[in-house]
Image (tube, helix red, strand yellow):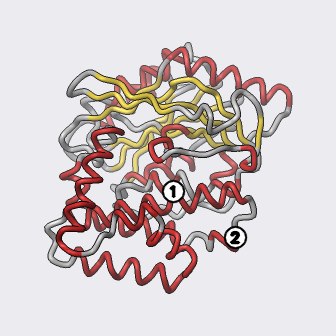
Amino acid sequence: MNKILSFGIPCYNSSEYMDHCISSILEGSDYAEDVQIIVVDDGSNKDDTLAKAQEWERRYPTIVKAVHQENGGHGIAVMKGLENAEGTYYKVVDSDDWVDGDSLKELLDLLRRFEELGTRVDLVISNYVYEHVEDGKQNVVDYEGSLPTNKIFTWDDMGHFSVKKYLLMHSLCYRTDVLRDGGLPMPPHTFYVDNIYAYVPFPRCKTLYYLPVNLYRYFIGRADQSVNEKVLTSRIDHYWRVARIMMKSYHLYDDIQSPKLRTYMLNYFTIIMAICSVFSRLSDRPDAMDQLQQLWDDLKAYDPRMYRHAKHGMVGTFSNLPTKAGEKTTLGIYKLAQKIVKFN
């Protein structure tokens, strides 16, 4: 049977929680034969992740595929899953997250309908839910009001996105050929590459569809998670790397024809630069501020208009306030945003 949807699950020492992720897809899809689950072991060295993946493949050989690679990091594991994907569509689910069964059924019904009708949709968007383990609370991120609902549309049809409702990897289900055609510049051994995944392919997506279901469940609260504040601060150099890749992927004013997509991408890139600015200030690396300044200088040299938008708009201004008092204000604004949005 032809596969309609391939799930890529990057796993690194994920033995403790990967079963929940895999079983949520199997059960949610009713063990459908047109679904593929690619479990990518990214060179796990502390547990039996690979053995577990192979056991899932043994139990469901027509649905689950276990793939091993030498440790390359999250982005390389995403690409290994894409390399092995047989489905018309491809979706990434991190191994400590899961999917909602009823929502998955609705997504599969939609994708099958596209296939039956010969309708090409390049990107299907759905909601995701922050699942906060520490207090048991949920925070749903939806796009109603920002995107047309239950219809095919283009970037020119979208509305305004608030700061807390950007399109992240969790909300995206791409056509596989969109990701393959033109490639994805995923650097090895780098966290936060989901920002590249939710940015670089967008101009290649000509038709979109928003399915307003709470599909993706995003686990928040493990101390070693990459979005944990202390972890992120210690890996600020990863964010610098990601920002440079995003920066040099496009001259946004010249390369992006849709005004609304251009504005969206400019605003998203600005958020990434703001994160670099805030967490460089939080970092105890002695060279953090010098590296941050070099990043801004590189952006100014690469594209002065992108630089002005990112540095001197409201977000850029408040995340780069000068003097010690300004730095204190910047960090205070970050703490307030963290409390409201609860993103880590």
Q: Nearer the viewer, mark 2 or mark 1?
A: 1
**Disc 1 residue type (three-letter):** Tyr
**Disc 2 residue type (three-letter):** Asp
Pick whichever, 327 or 302, lies toward us. Answer: 327
Which residue is rendered at x = 56% and y = 45% of the image? 161
Pick whichever, 5 or 147, lies toward us. Answer: 147
The label on residue 255 is: 2
- Across and down, in percent, residue 211 comes to 64, 28
Residue 43 is at least partly visible in this image: yes
Residue 44 is at least partly visible in this image: no
The label on residue 268 is: 1
Locate residue 256: give its quadrant. Answer: bottom right
The answer to whether 305 appears left or right of 19 in the picture is right
Q: How far apart are marks 2 and 1 (CA)?
A: 16 Å
Task: Assign a secondary structure to mark 2.
Answer: helix
Location of the C terminus (image quadrant): top left
- Across and down, in percent, residue 165 comes to 49, 41
